[in-house]
Image (tube, grey):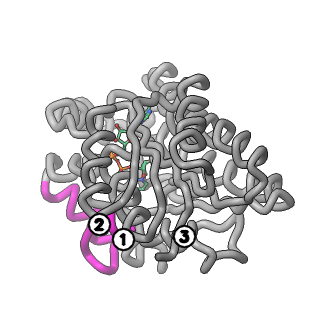
């Protein structure tokens, strides 16, 4: 019970990494607020938490909305009497990404085929609204979630651990579309800055920078031509994607006191991607 009597808020908790983290935290004794723009999926996660004997509540939250983030943070205090851990796992890989919608992903892959042939022209043609959307959800959404939770954490005065979801794309420009890599690099810098600002309040802030993980977000690779995907897998010494549980276990370490001297750090569960 590494998170005994702790209270966690997890954005993007309805799918993939956020969902696995909610269940893993509950197994270790934490009560969890599961927030997601897909409220029905957040509710499914609550069912999974209860199935392992844990406690959780769901809330529909669009992370770009300040009031909804506030309601999410308040729900932790009202339901469980505290707020110790925040995981900001809500995110999108491109402007039209809708977790779980494989048809939309197939369309997106088709539209991108020409861009790979003419990358410079693709930069000229990039729609700034699409860039803004990815930055809004991934960067502003992370900051707004942290702000709302931090306000309660400071009131409570009990310290805590904040875990952001960056990516290998925070450091490698070829690890995703332009908007995505820019957003993840900003999440990583935000994490380091927050770590410095919050250390005196005994709140640690760390990032996880996963490699390719088996969630809806990488289902796109199953839709791509084999030779293109093979080039991606060749970059991973372990030769395969990781699982959401691999990331949940990293989050568990960062949430627990075992990582008490870690802040402003990024962990890369990536199958060896960065060993070059
Ligand atoms: N899967 C990977 O390979 C991988 C690698 C590196 C980083 N990440 C990051 O990990 C995080 C989780 O990704 P995942 O792979 O679990 O994807 P996922 O699509 O399975 O889960 C993302 C969740 O975020 C939710 N979400 C999206 N926009 C939201 C919004 N505006 N407000 C609230 N919730 C919203 C979705 O509904 C979904 O439940 C993301 O930030 C992603 O960028 C993923």
The mark closer to the camera, 3 or 1, is: 1
Mark 3 neighbour class, 10 Å CA radius: few under 14, some 14 to 19, many 20 or more:
some
Q: Is residue 114 visible?
A: no
Residue 243 badge: 2
Residue for badge 1: 246
The residue closer to the viewer here, 131 or 142, is 142
How far across and down, in percent of the image, does residue 163 sit?
57, 57
Residue 241 falls inside the magenta stretch? yes
Asked if the residue at tag 2 contacts the one at tag 1, i.e. Cβ–Cβ closer than 8 Å, the answer is yes
Q: Is residue 213 above or below residue 271?
A: above
Q: Is residue 32 above or below residue 114?
A: below
Residue for badge 3: 267
Name the secondary structure under disc 2: loop
How far across and down, in percent of the image, does residue 186 sit?
63, 45
- Does label 3 or label 2 sit earlier along the sequence? 2
Give the residue drawn at x 49%, y 55%: 169
Q: For the residues marked 3 and 1, what is the alpha-carbon distance in whole angstroms?
A: 12 Å
Mark 2 neighbour class, 10 Å CA radius: few under 14, some 14 to 19, many 20 or more:
some
Quarter containing ligand 1? Answer: top left
The residue closer to the viewer here, 84 or 221, is 84
Give the residue drawn at x 51%, y 75%: 2
Q: Which of the 4 image quarters holds residue 171?
A: bottom right
Mark 1 neighbour class, 10 Å CA radius: few under 14, some 14 to 19, many 20 or more:
some
- Does label 3 or label 1 sit earlier along the sequence? 1
* Span of residues in magenta: 226-247
How far across and down, in percent of the image, does residue 167 sit?
48, 57
The residue closer to the viewer here, 274 or 14, is 14
Give the residue drawn at x 35%, y 36%: 118
Q: For the residues marked 3 and 2, what is the alpha-carbon distance in whole angstroms?
A: 15 Å
Q: Is residue 204 visible?
A: yes
Q: For the residues marked 1 and 2, what is the alpha-carbon distance in whole angstroms?
A: 5 Å
């Amino acid at each position: 019970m590494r998170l005994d009597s702790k209270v966690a808020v997890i954005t993007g908790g309805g799918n993939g990494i956020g969902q696995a983290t909610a269940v893993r935290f509950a197994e270790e004794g934490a009560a969890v607020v599961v927030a997601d723009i897909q409220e029905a999926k957040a509710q499914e996660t609550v069912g999974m938490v209860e199935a392992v004997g844990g406690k959780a509540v769901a809330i529909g939250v669009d992370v770009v909305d300040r009031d909804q983030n506030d309601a999410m943070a308040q729900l932790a205090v009202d339901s469980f009497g505290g707020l110790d851990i925040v995981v900001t796992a809500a995110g999108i890989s491109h402007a039209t990404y809708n977790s779980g919608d494989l048809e939309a992903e197939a369309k997106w892959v088709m539209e991108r085929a020409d861009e790979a042939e003419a990358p410079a022209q693709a930069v000229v043609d990039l729609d700034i609204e699409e860039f803004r959307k990815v930055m809004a959800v991934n960067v502003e959404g992370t900051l707004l979630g942290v702000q709302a939770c931090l306000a309660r954490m400071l009131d409570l005065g009990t310290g805590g651990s904040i875990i952001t979801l960056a990516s290998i794309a925070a450091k490698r420009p070829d690890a995703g579309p332009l908007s995505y890599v820019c957003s993840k690099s900003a999440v990583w810098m935000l994490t380091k800055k927050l770590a410095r600002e919050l250390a005196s309040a005994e709140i640690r802030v760390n990032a996880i920078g996963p490699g390719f993980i088996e969630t809806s977000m990488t289902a796109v690779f199953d839709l791509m031509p084999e030779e293109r995907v093979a080039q991606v897998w060749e970059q991973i010494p372990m030769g395969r994607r990781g699982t959401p549980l691999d990331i949940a276990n990293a989050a568990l370490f960062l949430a627990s006191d075992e990582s008490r001297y870690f802040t402003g750090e990024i962990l890369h569960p990536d199958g060896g991607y960065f060993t070059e």
